[in-house]
Image (cartoon, grey):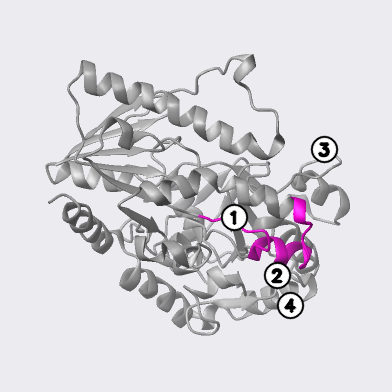
Amino acid sequence: MRILFLHNNFPAQFGAIGQYLSRDGWDVTFMTQRTGAKADGINAVVYRDRDVKEEHKIRHPFLASTGKAVVTGTSALEVAQHLTHEKGYTPDIIVAHSGWGPGLFMKDVWPDAAYVGYFEWYYRGEADDIVFMNGPGRPAMEGARERIRNSPIVADLITCDLGIVPTRYQASQFPDLFSSKLRVMHDGIDTGFYAPGDPGPVQFDDQTFHKGDEIVTYVARGMEPYRGFPEFMQALATVQKRRPNLRAIIVGEDRTAYGKPLKSGKTYKEAALEDLDLDMSRITFTGLVPRPTYKKVLQISSVHIYFTVPFVLSWSMMEAMSTGCLILGSDTAPVREVMTNGQNGMLTDFKDADRVADDLEHALSMRAEYDELRNAARQTIVDRYAARDLYPAKKALFSSLVG
């Protein structure tokens, strides 16, 4: 079976399942914009966004993301044509990340291939994340922009034979018109790798951490309101004063991955360090770290923080659950799909910094008595989201689309 994955990044959501299929004898090709991408069993092919001639550039701001998706799609189309004409390549199945545009025109090259769209989010004028952060009554002009922003997503919804969405909450954002095409199936968590354990001393610069130390951990791609970073830092400043032995490890980049940056030009990290009374000697910012180091951070965590507005659920929360972390999570819909307060974690209103501080202090003071929450968190991932179960299920799903 020949399968083609398309994603601007690598390995992203498709690398691990691609390697699994390759080990099972499938011919796996991955088209990406990531130069130097490579993985055992995967043939990586690079496409790059082509420069658009001045007279063809789209000026209306509403069309910025749609125009970029078309540029990405036509760039991938050129590479696909080369693969079929020069290499004789024809996939049986195409799986593409929908929204950025790499798969938009694959059916024009290979009309007989089964096309699977990977859908993460559908933009709505009164979207849950926007209402959560700014309240209802969004200006009509902003809703209009969001409607047009869905253009490449809708094109993929119409073209695809099947759409995969990682969680039920994310699927609920899509119009009912497309529900018959969408299948909820998570990407899968490597529960063998993300497992409880004692990694021994963990070193960051001049700081050494051990399992059993009082450590609060926070992980996100960026540091922004979408993932509750300002509220976490405000609560941390409070709890530091109450618990002199508390140290914090914060993993992620000092950037805004989701949402809008500050108008001042400062990053949210810079603003927090400027505005809050923090003991920086007890806070470690690691930046991005390799997976083995990231796992060690989770393994030594006393309490792990995961906050999000109603939006795409992060892998990091499930990886932390699989590693047996005691999690203080946001009481928001995507988190509640996986976590129940008092059963496999603790939920809080992360917009209330005083409550977050109290809940964090409580979790820290009771962490030795909450082993049942840690065990239940891991069991949730093992039972419902383990890659060892989801990869075979996805293989069967893909196979069913080909005769």
For label 4, the residue is 358
For label 2, the residue is 350
Figure quadrant of residue 217: bottom right
- Callout 2 amino acid: Phe
How far apart, in angstroms, are the residues tagged by discs 1 and 3? 26 Å
- Callout 1 amino acid: Tyr
Q: Is residue 185 visible?
A: no
Classify mark 1: residues with Cα within 10 Å, few (<14), some (14-19) or many (20+): some
**Label 4 vs 2, first from the N-terminus:** 2
Residue depth check, mark 3 versus mark 4: number of the one nearer the observer: 3
For label 3, the residue is 265
Residue drawn 52% across the image and 77% down it:
345
Given residues 318 and 139, the one toward you in this image is 139
How far apart, in angstroms, are the residues tagged by discs 4 and 2? 11 Å
- Callout 3 amino acid: Gly
How far apart, in angstroms, are the residues tagged by discs 3 and 2? 25 Å
Mark 4 residue element? helix
How far apart, in angstroms, are the residues tagged by discs 1 and 2? 23 Å
Position of 138 with respect to 319 (left or right) is: right
Q: Is residue 389 visible?
A: yes
Which segment did they paint magenta? 121-141
**Label 3 vs 4, first from the N-terminus:** 3
Given residues 94 and 298, the one toward you in this image is 94
Residue depth check, mark 4 versus mark 2: number of the one nearer the observer: 2
Classify mark 4: residues with Cα within 10 Å, few (<14), some (14-19) or many (20+): some
Residue 20 in the magenta stretch? The answer is no
Q: Mark 3–mark 2 contact, CB under 8 Å?
A: no
For label 1, the residue is 123
Residue drawn 45% across the image and 64% down it:
177
Q: Mark 4–mark 2 contact, CB under 8 Å?
A: no
- Residue 233 % position (x, y): 75, 59
- Residue 365 % position (x, y): 64, 78
